[in-house]
Structures are given as C-alpha cells and as structure tokens.
Amino acid sequence: MDLAVRMEGIKKSFGANYVLKEVDFSASKGSIHALLGENGAGKSTLMNILGNVVTKDDGTVFVGETEVDYSRDVKIINENIAFIHQELSLVNDLRIYENLYLGSEIKKGPFLDKKTMSRRTQEVLSRMGVNISPNTMVSELSPSYKQITEIARAMLKDAQIIIMDEPTSSLTDVETELIFEVMRTLRNQGICLIFISHKLNEVIAICDEYTILRDGEVVATGKIEEGTTEKDLSTHMVGLEVQTEGIYRPRELGEVILEIEGMSREREYKSVNMKLHKGEVLGVTGLLGDGRTELFASVYGANFPYEGKVLVEGKEIKMRSTSTAVKNKIAYVPKNRKENGIIRDLIIKENLVLPIMQKISKFGVIKGKLRDSTTNEYVEKLDIRVSNINNLITSLSGGNQQKVVLGKALCTNPDVVILDNPTQGVDVGAKMEIYRLIISLAEQGYSFILLSNEVPELQRTCDRVYVMFEGEVRQEFSREEMTEENIMLIATGGRLEG
C-alpha cells in the first residue's frame, strides 16, 4: 500500500518533560489506522505535530512522497490533513452547509451563494453515503450526525488524511455503527483515517492497522488480524497484562434507599419503576432515545416537572431542583467530563470543592486549610495521581480528571451517586481503576446508578441491570442474566423467548 503519511524520529519536549522520543509513525492510503496509548502517552501531541498545531523539536514528516517543511508548506498541510477533535467545533444555530463553509463562504457579487454551497455540501454527503439535507440545522442533529458533519467539512476540502480523536466516546452502539459505515466508505475511496480511541473493541471492529505509544515511544505496530484481542492491545498499552476479570465482588445489600414509581415526562420516558438498594451498583442501559439520561436528570432535579414519584428512604421528594437532590443526599457525575464535569481554567483543588463552597467559606472568604484538607482527603481516598493540588485540572490525565469529578460528587456526602457514562474518554487501565473504585465505595455503603452504553462495563460493576427501550423499562436482569446477547435483544426492541 502507498503511504499517506510517514513521520520519522519525531521528538518533542515541554520543558524537562520529554513527550515524544524519536517516534516513527506511518499510515497507508485507503486504511483505518488506530493510534493507541494511555492518557499522556503522546498520541495527541504526535497528531498535533502532523496537523501543524504543535511544533516538533526534531524529525521529518512526509505527506505522500513530499517532505513537509512546516515553515513554508502550510498549504500542503491545510489541504491534505483534517483533524476532527473530540470537542466538536460546530455552530448549532447554523445549517449543515453553513457550518461546512464557515469562514470560506462562496459569494455571488456581494451576496452569499447559498445555492452553490448547499449543492456542493449535498455532493459531499452523497459521496459519504449519508442521506440528510444540507439545509438541516445542526441543533437538530443527533451526536452521530454532528460527527458526520465534521467529517463532511474535512471532505469538502478534499482532505486525504483525516485524524479522528475519540469520535465515538459519547455515542451509542447504533450511532457508532453509523460513523463506522461512513469511515468504511471513505477508506474505500482511498482516504487514510487515523483513529484515536480507548475503545479497543471498536479498534478491532473497524481498523486495519495499529500503532501503540507508551511514555512517548512506539512499543508496538501491526495489522488487526483475525485473532487480535483487546487483551493483546491493552497489554502493550500499559506494559503489563491488564487485569479485567475479578473486579466485581458480591456483597450483602441493604434496604431500598431510592425508588422510582410510575415516572413519566412528555415523550422522554414513561411509567418507569425502579428500586436501588444501599450498597448496590445498579446499571441502566439502552440505545439512542432510550430516555435514561432524561429520567435521571429528573431524579436529580434538573428536569422538572415530571409525573410519578421519587422516594428517598420511603419518603416522596419532589425533585424541583438540583439543590433538592443534594439536600436529599443524591449526587450526579455528568457525562462528557470536558464540557460538564470540570472547569479547565481552575486548579485541581478549586474544581474538587466547587459543590461545597458554602461549607468551606465564611462571609464569602474561603477557609484555605479546610479546602486543602478536603481536597487531600479525596485525592487519597480516590487515589488521584497528582503532583500538586495547585496545578491546573488539565495537567491531569483523563482518568485522574474523572476521579476529580467523582470526588466533586462524593464531597457533598451523598448516599446515592448517579454516574452517567463515567469512563468516557479514559484509557483501559484507568477504566479498570474506576471500576474497582466503584466496587470499593459500594462496599463502604455508597449506592450507585450507572448509566452506560458498554455491556462489559455493566458486567464488571453491576449487581442488576435495567434495560430501557423508547422511554420504557423493558427488562430487569440479574448478574447471571446480563449477557451481551440478552441486553442487546431487549435494547433493540426484542423480547426474550419463553
């Protein structure tokens, strides 16, 4: 296969921190190439160098047969390489074609040539095999179609190399398959896709080749062949065999601590009944439009009004606001850490104690010693790897940032913690750490509701699972029953035989 990109001897350091140490990387035309590694391994830095976002210290880069001089060959980079970041850069209040041409609009005299822009956008979407109108407002799109719009923007400039950073991190299985179909279509047209992901099952499903970085060095490269396993890849990523089994530990559960009775809200969810016991990890899963996020937003007081009842220790509580939920010892860890869980411009200790500012301040003045001692308590309790709590939150790896978000929830002293996609965007080693942490906290008496798209995640942590379909609970599974086949059958609207 002809190479789309070749990087040789790439070095990069930030001060005394050597992020990339003579890295060699290449990817072929007409292929999907996985770039893997734990958080902090150097994946993003390497791709940022390729995309001319970060300047390399040493090494050479070839795009096709052309050696790129980044001081003068900006046009080659701009025309051939597109970087689709995890945080999408779309404008919700514009149409698809307006987003694609934002900053490079076609004009006819003093006026925008909307007809031409719409037509060319339609040509790109058709080339991708996507059936959607270019005049659709981005605000009306599902997460998968927003991701497709970003890909279409790359296709519009005829990019030959598309870097996709965690493109499926917030998508359901159905949405992910839609993205995969588009990726396969582009691969068949000779385009090189570089796929950065922590979901190793997806890497095996969609990718042709892989490169694995660890501590700024390439530790493995190869083809994804029949027989390649997640275990093979994860072992290279962390430098040792990742222990994925034996995380769940059976334990005696307490009384019912939270109960949902006949809850309904417009078209979001209907007639939902659930029970959660003290010390239990309860899973809730389904596919796109299952209603679980909206349901538990209501339980947390962020989606009022609703019909039905929320009972905390047998007493009905009207969840009119999030403060009502917090007073009744319910905490929420939101999905999409970067958008909803952390404030990037604040340091670690400021992020962690945000929910309890009133408790650690007097007359508007923060009690510094109490803030620091509280932060250190949760740093130790959750084993957050941090060199200094005065560093920016962004100095931490994704897994440790997620632990800070969990610490934010726990410092409110809850009995019930709702976890919405708690391992989104973290590597396999950090995932296992978070799973063990959940089980350990459950043993201490915390109760968890885990909203997740990933069946292995549910199997490693949950005592029971509710499966939702189109806003309704369709099935409850015990641990013994929560197989991937059973869950997917119900999640797609099927029913168990007998």
Image (spheres, rainbow, N blue to C red):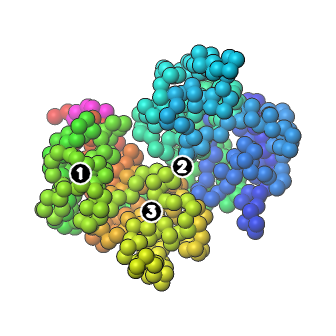
Residue at 63% x, 59% y is 40
The tag earlier along the polypeptide, 2 or 3, is 2
Q: Decide: is 322 above or below 485.
A: below
Across and down, in percent, residue 402 comes to: 47, 60
Between the C-alphas of marks 3 and 1, the distance is 29 Å
Residue occupied by mark 2: 198
What kind of element bears circle 2?
loop
Between the C-alphas of marks 2 and 3, the distance is 19 Å
Q: Which corner quadrant of the image does residue 121 belong to?
A: top right
Across and down, in percent, residue 351 comes to: 49, 66
Question: Which residues lie in the magenta part?
Answer: 492-496
Residue occupied by mark 3: 405
Q: Amino acid at mark 2?
A: His
Q: Which corner quadrant of the image does residue 323 belong to?
A: bottom left
What kind of element bears circle 1?
strand
On-image quarter of the N terminus: top right
Residue occupied by mark 1: 478
How packed is label 3: few (under 14 Cα within 10 Å), some, or many (20 or more)? Answer: many
Q: Which corner quadrant of the image does residue 418 belong to?
A: bottom left
Q: Main secondary structure of the magenta part?
A: loop
Q: Decide: is 430 above or below 181.
A: below
Asked whether 334 falls inside the magenta stretch, the response is no
